Image (tube, grey):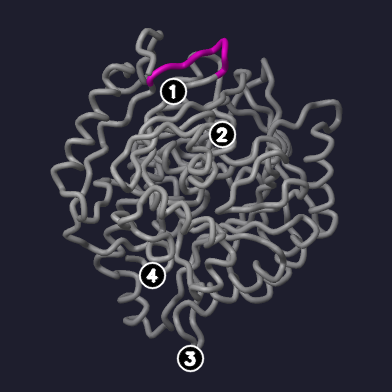
């Protein structure tokens, strides 16, 4: 491992600069932790935070402390790459790369998502129609495997099977300690155009054309996402890098980004604020916490209006079940939590939206196009047709259960419909698949071969156990 390169501190953070030598010391310390646990005992990561919407049961299983792996080790603006440790948050990574006029090719929406988490658990954002998912810009991964080795996996070395099988493995094959990723240049600002549609067929046709042409009215289209407020109120948001703007909006405190989509046809943000436009209100989920009124926003201030704080509130809710108790006291039916991201081929996006409006009373819905970056690469645990443009639907709320309906009814309905429409579902939230169906969807044959090669004693959880059984 090279240790002579120039290093960069995490910009704006109270965090020591990373060095390759320091990284090597942390790797040695982690291996010593693992050796002390014993060769046959199961292990887990010790993490204070998570962006998974799955309940993690309390366990006495020994835990590895990886909190120190939170350094941006090196940004090479000329090569357009960065060496980054696995626990670095995207907020820290973006601050470091923007200093060099660069950004990661895909920046997931929430500041506290870690690079290692996005690669092993997938991610998506408005550049995904041209850059795919975060793992598609990775050049190499240093992994602590389940069997205790530290290996460097690249697309064409002896660990290429792990490199390609790591995405969607959710830490069940190993933990990313260091990643080298590609970057792309940015401009200071992003111009936004919110294009309203009333007809779903025209909406998805326009989305497909923008992803194909990558230009509108003489401007490049660098970002594409959308928001559906109702069956006849749909917006495409087209983002363009620009050098100069007449002024910028601020959605980090009193004003709310998603509400501006309905009110403004054109808007401008700094590039940093554009990348984090959804974090301040956790898309729109902050409304359930009562902080979309100006007085509580004023009292809370910018520092507390962020997804990281909302996660803590949700953790308390999970612990004490306050919402369910209030529903019972008010005589209202119980609710089923539906927090999912799915993608279906563009040609079936209208069918899925029609189903969703008919069966799942949740609004708004986030829309994000996705296309695999290269047709020469296979990602076996989350296989997409590289020639197909997919449409991601994100929906995060709860729906009332009718008398006799079991919890999970609507989630199972969504899973079935997505499969019927040739789509895939992200596993960051609760899943309800039967085991045989799960392994058919997520390539059980390849997964179990990887498990045998890198975690033969099953010291880490099995993917089905972790994502469906919730162990």
Q: The residue tagged with tag 1: helix, strand or loop?
A: strand
Picture quadrant of residue 152: top left
Picture quadrant of residue 156: top right
Where does label 3 land, which residue?
Answer: 403
**Residue 77 on the magenta segment:** yes
Q: CA distance from mark 3 to mark 4?
A: 25 Å
- Nearer-N-terminus badge (2/4): 2
Count neighbours of disc 1 (C-alpha within 10 A) and say few if under 14, some if 14 to 19, many if 20 or more.
many
**Location of residue 336 with respect to 215 vertically, above or below:** below
Position of 247 with respect to 10 (left or right) is right
Q: Nearer the viewer, residue 15 or 322?
A: 15
Where does label 2 land, which residue?
Answer: 155
Where does label 4 land, which residue?
Answer: 469
Where does label 1 land, which residue?
Answer: 83
Q: The residue tagged with tag 4: helix, strand or loop?
A: helix
**Residue 466 screen position, x and y as percent:** 38, 62
- Nearer-N-terminus badge (3/2): 2
Q: CA distance from mark 2 to mark 4?
A: 32 Å
* Residue plotted at (16% across, 59% down): 60
Res. 421 visible in picture: yes
* Residue plotted at (81% across, 47% down): 208
- Asked if labels 4 and 1 touch by Cβ distance under 8 angstroms, the answer is no
- Nearer-N-terminus badge (2/1): 1
| Magenta-tinted stretch | 73-80
Most extreme residue toward the bottom, as rendered?
A: 404
**Residue 317 screen position, x and y as percent:** 30, 63
**Location of residue 311 with respect to 88 vertically, above or below:** below
- Asked if labels 2 and 3 touch by Cβ distance under 8 angstroms, the answer is no
Position of 302 with respect to 200 (left or right) is left
């Amino acid at each position: 491992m090279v240790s002579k390169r120039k290093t960069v501190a995490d910009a704006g953070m109270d965090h020591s600069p990373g060095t390759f030598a320091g990284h090597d010391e942390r790797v040695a310390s982690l291996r010593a932790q693992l050796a002390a646990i014993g060769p046959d005992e199961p292990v887990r990561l010790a993490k204070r935070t998570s962006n998974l919407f799955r309940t993690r049961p309390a366990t006495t299983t020994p835990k590895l402390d990886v909190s120190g792996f939170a350094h941006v080790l090196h940004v090479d603006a000329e090569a357009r790459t960065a060496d980054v440790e696995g626990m670095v948050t995207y907020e820290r990574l973006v601050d470091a790369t923007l200093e060099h006029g660069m950004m990661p090719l895909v920046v997931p929406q929430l500041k506290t998502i870690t690079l290692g988490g996005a690669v092993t658990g997938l991610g998506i954002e408005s550049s995904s129609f041209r850059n795919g998912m975060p793992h598609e810009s990775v050049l190499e991964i240093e992994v602590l495997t389940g069997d205790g080795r530290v290996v460097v996996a690249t697309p064409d070395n002896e660990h290429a099977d792990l490199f390609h099988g790591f995405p969607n493995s959710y830490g069940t094959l190993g933990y990313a300690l260091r990643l080298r990723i590609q970057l792309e240049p940015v401009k200071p600002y992003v111009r936004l155009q919110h294009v309203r549609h009333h007809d779903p067929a025209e909406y998805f046709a326009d989305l497909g054309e923008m992803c194909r042409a990558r230009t509108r009215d003489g401007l490049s289209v660098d970002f594409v996402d959308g928001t559906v407020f109702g069956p006849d109120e749909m917006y495409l948001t087209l983002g363009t890098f620009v050098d100069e703007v007449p002024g910028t909006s601020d959605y980090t405190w009193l004003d709310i980004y998603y509400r501006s989509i309905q009110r403004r046809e054109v808007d401008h943000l700094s590039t940093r604020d554009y990348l984090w436009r959804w974090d301040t209100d956790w898309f729109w989920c902050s409304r359930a916490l009562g902080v979309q009124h100006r007085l509580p926003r004023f009292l809370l201030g910018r520092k507390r209006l962020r997804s990281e704080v909302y996660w803590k509130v949700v953790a308390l809710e999970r612990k004490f079940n306050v919402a369910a108790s209030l529903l019972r006291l008010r005589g209202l039916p119980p609710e089923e939590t539906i927090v999912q991201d799915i993608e279906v081929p563009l040609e079936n996006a209208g069918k899925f939206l029609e189903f969703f409006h008919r069966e799942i009373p949740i609004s708004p819905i986030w829309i994000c196009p996705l296309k695999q970056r290269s047709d020469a690469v296979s990602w076996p645990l989350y296989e997409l047709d590289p020639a197909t443009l997919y449409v991601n639907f994100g929906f995060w709320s709860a729906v009332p259960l009718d008398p006799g309906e079991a919890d999970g009814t609507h989630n199972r309905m969504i899973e079935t419909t997505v499969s019927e429409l040739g789509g895939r579902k992200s596993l960051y939230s609760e899943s309800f698949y039967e085991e045989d169906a799960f392994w058919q969807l997520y390539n059980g044959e390849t997964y179990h071969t990887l498990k045998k090669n890198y975690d033969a004693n099953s010291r880490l959880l099995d993917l089905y156990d972790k994502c469906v059984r919730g162990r």
